[in-house]
Image: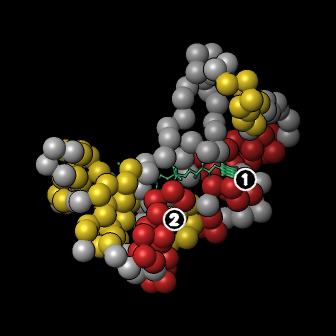
Amino acid sequence: MKKVLILGGGFAGVQTAIELQKKGIFDVTLVSDRDYLYLYPISIWVPVHLKEFDDIKVPLANIQKKYPFKLIIDKVTGISASESKVTCQSQALTYDYLVMAFGADKMQHKGIYHTLSICAKPEMALEIRNRIDDLVQKGSGKIAIGFGGNPKDKSAVRGG
Ligand SMILES: Cc1cc2nc3c(=O)[nH]c(=O)nc-3n(C[C@H](O)[C@H](O)[C@H](O)COP(=O)(O)OP(=O)(O)OC[C@H]3O[C@@H](n4cnc5c(N)ncnc54)[C@H](O)[C@@H]3O)c2cc1C
């Protein structure tokens, strides 16, 4: 069987692992530095205490039980395409096919400092919650809510 390595355990990586495993013709391994799939869209309820951080996490091991791909929890530190090799913190892996699904880092645009974005990384939901809790404790304060565009694509918007 051809070996497929999928790097990243977010929606993209997990869905790819499920679909390729279902085909039954690949040896599928998912590598993620988190042991859970984080459900970003419902993370908005964490800052206002309507959901706990753990409610947003789906253990990758549970998904793997239903769709038995191989699962490795490790941080990818390097990729050598010429050797078909991926280096992780505690091991090296080889592949026939490689899928990179690392997600995106949030860009810090000029002028946008001191902001927290719920889609930047899971822990941000908790940081935003702490800030809101501080405001409630204080009794007053200001919350700035941003809505951004993309000068290179006028149809693109992002609220926050
Ligand atoms: C409030 C909110 C609402 C949203 N609503 C929608 C919606 O309605 N529809 C929609 O399509 N999208 C929505 N999104 C966006 C959506 O959540 C993201 O587009 C999606 O999570 C991106 O998935 P991904 O797998 O590409 O990346 P991520 O979810 O970022 O996953 C990346 C994975 O790679 C892993 N990783 C990163 N670096 C390494 C490394 N070096 N080694 C090993 N693993 C690594 C991470 O641990 C993570 O598991 C929403 C987001 C938010 C915050």
Residue closest to the far top: 111
Q: Find disc 1 in the rendering and name its residue.
A: 44
Whether residue 33 can be seen here: no
Q: Is mark 1 within 8 Å of ligand 1?
A: yes
Whether residue 80 can be seen here: yes
Q: Residue at x 48, y 70 (%)?
A: 19
Residue 123, position as x, y percentages in the image: 55, 50
Q: Say which of 22 and 149 sits in front.
A: 22
- Element assignment for label 2: helix
Q: Which residue is drawn at 23% across and 60% down?
A: 95
Three-letter residue code for mark 1: Ile
Q: How would you rate the neighbour count of disc 1 (Cα within 10 Å): few for under 14, some for 14-19, many for 20 or more?
A: some
Q: Is residue 148 above or below residue 5?
A: above
On the picture, is 127 further left or further right than 65?
right
Give the quadrant of the C terminus.
top right
Q: Say which of 95 and 105 sits in front.
A: 95
Number of numbered discs on residues: 2
Q: Residue at x 37, y 54 (%)?
A: 99
Q: Find disc 2 in the rendering and name its residue.
A: 15
Q: In this view, does 70 lie above or below 50?
A: below
Counting residues from the N terminus, which is met first, the one under dot 2 or under dot 1? 2
- Element assignment for label 1: helix
The quadrant holding residue 61 is bottom left
